[in-house]
Image (cartoon, rainbow, N blue to C red):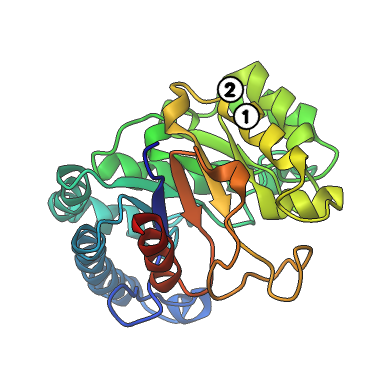
Amino acid sequence: MTAPAYGLVCMTVGPEVRFRTVTLSRYRELSPSEREAKLLDLYTDNISRLRGAADFCAARGIRLYRMSASLFPMLDLIGDETGDAVLTSLSGQLREAGQAFVDRGIRVLMHPEQFIVLNSDTPDVRVRSVHALNSHARVMDGMGLDRSPWNLLLLHGGKGGRAAELQAVIPDLPDAARLRLGLENDEYAYGPADLLPVCEALGVPLVYDGHHHVIHDRLSDQDDPAVREWVLKARATWTPPDWQVVHLSNGIDSPQDRRHSHLITHLPAAFADVPWIEVEAKGKEEAVGGLMEAGAM
């Protein structure tokens, strides 16, 4: 059986993969020309650091990388095109960074911020959510990444009790976002059983998170038979099935502790044949390296 590919999430615990940002309050204090200069400096540096992340992963045999959704601050501001203009001016560098991942066979995903709620009951939140999601898709396009779940753009279910509204809005998303979209179960609002009908109806893959499932459904731990059941149900939403991604994390004090532990101390048997596993541990590359070393033994 082929060993799974374990994924690094966004940054490292060490200094190797780190990104810069600016707060909205600080940005708003700047003049238009200062804003442009600030974003040009940030974007240029973060693209270089993103390129470095490809080198970091390749050197360690890491074949899955979750790109930070905060690489280009202010890109999603409605009514301010400064970020878009600056990123357009850097299109060559952005494409080179994307190609560095493609050339090394490293799969790139993104998991945008929790404030993207496509099915909010507030119209303004829905508008801003779609705009933000499209900004992230624009980055992935700029990197030359495929418009498919191979380069996943992942969201949670959003506002609880509004699965029908979520199902209604997704088909109207622009292709750049819709064709990459995946949905993930969470601890409170949407268990896997809540999202599966949406995924099946729309052809959207379900990214299964066993830790979230344990908390949501009050399971004893990730060795509960229901975990394997849902790994397989989620796999059936993926085309092809060997693109399936799951999330792996452990609680700090107990299986029901929503806080992520530093390292992965328990790998569920239910994940043994999952091809792609994103490791959501505070230890980042240390946790990934530990799993890869254990798998090689």
Tell me which corner region of the image, top left, top right, bottom left or bottom right, holds residue 296: bottom left
Residue 136 or residue 126, whichever sits in front? 136
Horizontal side, residue 280 vs residue 212: left or right: left
- State the separation of the CA atoms marked 1 and 2: 6 Å
Q: Quadrant of the C terminus?
A: bottom left
Q: Residue at x 29, y 72 (%)?
A: 42
Assess whether mark 2 and mark 1 are in contact (beta carbons under 8 angstroms): yes
Q: Amino acid at mark 1?
A: Leu
- Identify residue for label 2: 236
Q: Is residue 276 left or right of residue 60?
A: right
Q: Is residue 158 left or right of residue 236?
A: right
Please give the residue where the numbered disc 1 appears in the rendered image.
232
**Residue 47 at x, y = what percent?**
23, 63
On screen, 110 above or below 201?
below
Q: Secondary structure at mark 1?
A: helix
Give, as a three-letter code, the residue at label 2: Ala
Q: Secondary structure at mark 2?
A: loop
Residue 50, relative to residue 244: is it above or below? below
Farthest residue to the front: give it.
297
Observer-nearest of 260 and 82: 260
Q: Within 10 angstroms of label 1, few (less than 14), some, or many (20 or more) residues?
A: some
Q: Nearer the viewer, mark 1 or mark 2?
A: 1
* Residue 122 at x, y percent in the picture: 77, 46
Q: Which quadrant would residue 230 be assigned to in this image?
A: top right
